[in-house]
Image (cartoon, helix red, strand yellow):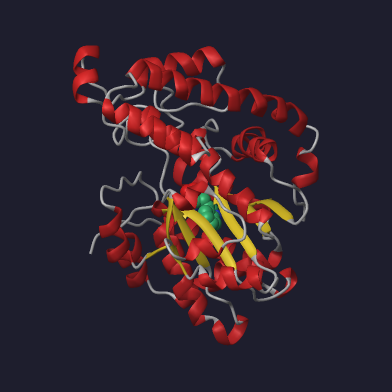
Amino acid sequence: MNIIDPWKSVEVKDYGKLMKEFGISPIKDLYKKLPIKHHYFSRGIIFGHKDFSKILEAIKDKKPFVMMTGLMPSGKFHLGHKVVADIIIYLQKLGAECYVAVADIEATLTRDVKREEARKVALDQYLLNYIALGLKSKKTKFYFQSNGSTEYNNLSKYVSKKTTFNEFKSVYGNLNPEKIISAFTQVADILHPQLKENGGPKPVIVPVGVDQLPHINLTRDIASRMKSEYNFVLPSSIFNKMLPGLQGGKMSSSRPESYIALTDSPKTVEMKIKKYAFSGGQPTTKEHKEKGGNPDVDISYQYLTFLEESDKKLKKIYDDYKSGKLLTSELKQITIDKINSFLKKHQDNRKKAKKKVNKFIFKN
Ligand code: TRP
């Protein structure tokens, strides 16, 4: 059995194998029951789930349900972070009450981020962009781990009684005290929307990348052992693929040549795509026209699978690139234009969002 380490960058080569090994179910048939379509589902960007049918039922029966997730406040907000934000906002549109945890305790313990710095990044980078992307303040609780309620804090301690050190080691592999505290804090993040003070037990959906799977599994096990006291509904989860970095691998805030930030200028976007975006094209135009390109490894094309909502347009780009009709420089230009037209609107929205930030912050 392999172990996923949520504190290291996880690269998945074979999603099918991963799903089998870790008990993630394919979402292929289920998503069609959703009342609002999203291309992240139909294109397999959201590829798997645990217990998602509980959420579909709540939507169908118009019963309350919660979207709960957390963010690591370090570095600049980039296109990879946008994917998670889009999913949060989509679930809000479906009627979810939203809980967003700023993992400032985890960032301080595991990444040496100072508390004040974490706060600033969470507000200036994350919250501002979430609002600009469409998050509404109604039914949203945006909170800091370091500023949770007494019941939330107590829960983060009581959950420790429901597991063992051996279980921890088998879930996480390498451990230290900071990781243990971070894990229990995250368990409390995921379970506290079901506390009495928050309206009691209800379905909760946690949208995450697969790197967070160990936390989801531990939380579900702990929740099942707390049934008699709290009557928790086991939290559900959906898993999304990560947007790749410009040169392949991970898009990471610590490497500017890997990311496109939502504050990048049109010139920077153009330079980054032209200079860094890995190409699936042939070395010469002549060869490209003869043999065609490979959209499946081409990063500019991969970005369009996230950004271009029209299936028809996307398919044409795929076919034309594969046949060699569309050149690498032309494909890159399509992606540059797509990103820049999104950013132009987004940067306007960011200015407007500044006025709304205060409405969101949950105070105890
Ligand atoms: N550990 C998560 C990360 O590294 C952040 C996080 C904290 C989180 N609490 C959470 C994610 C609750 C999902 C649910 O990004």
Which residue shows up at 59% across the image and 28% down it?
342
List x then y, in percent, for residue 65. 65, 67
Using the image, determine if residue 358 lies above or below residue 27.
above
Using the image, determine if residue 164 lies above or below residue 308.
below
Q: In the rendered image, is residue 173 in sight?
A: no
Using the image, determine if residue 74 lies above or below residue 173.
above
Does residue 135 appear to the left or right of 71 in the view shown? Answer: right
Closest to the observer, 331 or 230: 331
Tell how many labels.
Answer: 0
Question: Where is residue 351, by image quadrant?
Answer: top right
Which corner quadrant holds the C terminus?
bottom right
Which residue shows up at 23% across the image and 64% down it?
1
Question: Where is residue 214, by image quadrant?
Answer: bottom left
Closest to the observer, 311 or 115: 311
Does residue 13 appear to the left or right of 72 in the view shown? Answer: left
Closest to the observer, 320 or 211: 320
List x then y, in percent, for residue 24. 37, 65
List x then y, in percent, for residue 183. 47, 60
State the residue lying farthest toward the bottom.
228
Closest to the observer, 68 or 294: 294
Which residue shows up at 50% across the image and 33% down it?
79
Q: In the rendered image, is residue 276 in sight?
A: yes
List x then y, in percent, for residue 226. 54, 81
